[in-house]
Image: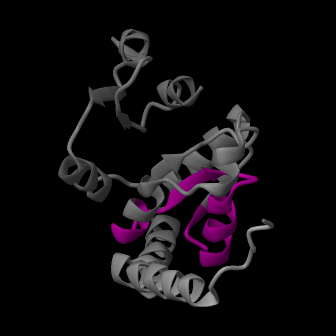
């Protein structure tokens, strides 16, 4: 769906990277579409480079899949690290974070009109893009950078290990 939306927007280019069982099918689907570029498998350094050179990052995940409700993919934090606004699916942990940090636009997954409007809004308003990107970077620095997250994880592990056994073996 995103490919079809972007294809209809002449001033927008979509760059997609990835691999897997649907790669060949996807490559065929986007072949010949002038504003869609499929790169296949790329290194993490290349992902960061592409993110840095983008105007926004789109992270649309189907919220009817339980994992998508709770997970926040790396691309969200990479976009924040690079100071890029996001377009994310409503009904996910990402949408709560993006709303709280005011660093992107939340859309209903599967709603092409909303998705298209979000893309067009960002495409036509560089001031908004800059503001959302600055908010994303600020949130990354203050809340989501690796050093802070590492410390939180270590503190959590310490807390859990200090709790001791909470369930006794009923022999």
Q: Nearer the viewer, residue 160 or 62?
A: 160
Quarter the N terminus occupies: top right
Report the span colored magenta: 79-104
Q: Which percent across, then down, holds residue 85? A: 48, 62
Q: Which percent across, then down, holds residue 131? A: 49, 75
Q: Residue furthest front?
A: 171
Lateral position of residue 122 relative to residue 14, left or right: right
Colour scheme shown? one colour
Q: Nearer the viewer, residue 94 or 118?
A: 94
User: Is any part of residue 114 visible from this angle?
Assistant: yes
Identify the residue at image location x=55%, y=69%. 103
61 within the magenta span: no
80 within the magenta span: yes
User: Is any part of residue 56 visible from this angle?
Assistant: no
Q: Residue furthest right?
A: 170
Lateral position of residue 22 relative to residue 82, left or right: right
Identify the residue at image location x=71%, y=33%. 110
Reply above or below: 143 against 70.
below
Reply above or below: 115 against 80.
above
Q: Which percent across, then down, holds residue 31? A: 34, 12
Identify the residue at image location x=39%, y=55%. 55
Reply above or below: 116 against 83.
above
Lateral position of residue 161 relative to residue 142, left or right: right
Identify the residue at image location x=46%, y=77%. 144
Q: Which percent across, then down, holds residue 102? A: 61, 74
Quarter the C terminus occupies: bottom right
Q: Nearer the viewer, residue 46 or 68?
A: 68
């Amino acid at each position: 769906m995103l490919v079809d939306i972007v294809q209809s927007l002449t001033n927008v280019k979509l760059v997609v990277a990835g691999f897997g069982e649907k790669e060949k099918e996807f490559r065929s689907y986007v072949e010949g579409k002038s504003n869609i570029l499929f790169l296949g498998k790329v290194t993490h350094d290349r992902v960061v480079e592409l993110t840095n050179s983008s105007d926004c990052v789109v992270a649309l995940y189907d919220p009817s899949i339980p994992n998508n409700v709770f997970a926040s993919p790396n691309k969200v934090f990479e976009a924040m690290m690079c100071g890029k606004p996001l377009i994310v699916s409503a009904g996910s942990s990402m949408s709560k974070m993006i709303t709280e940090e005011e660093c992107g636009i939340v859309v209903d997954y599967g709603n092409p009109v909303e998705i298209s409007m979000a893309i067009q809004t960002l495409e036509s308003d560089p001031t908004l893009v800059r503001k959302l990107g600055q908010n994303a970077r600020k949130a990354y620095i203050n809340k989501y950078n690796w050093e802070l997250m590492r410390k939180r994880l270590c503190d959590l592990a310490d807390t859990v290990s200090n709790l001791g056994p909470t369930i006794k073996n009923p022999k």
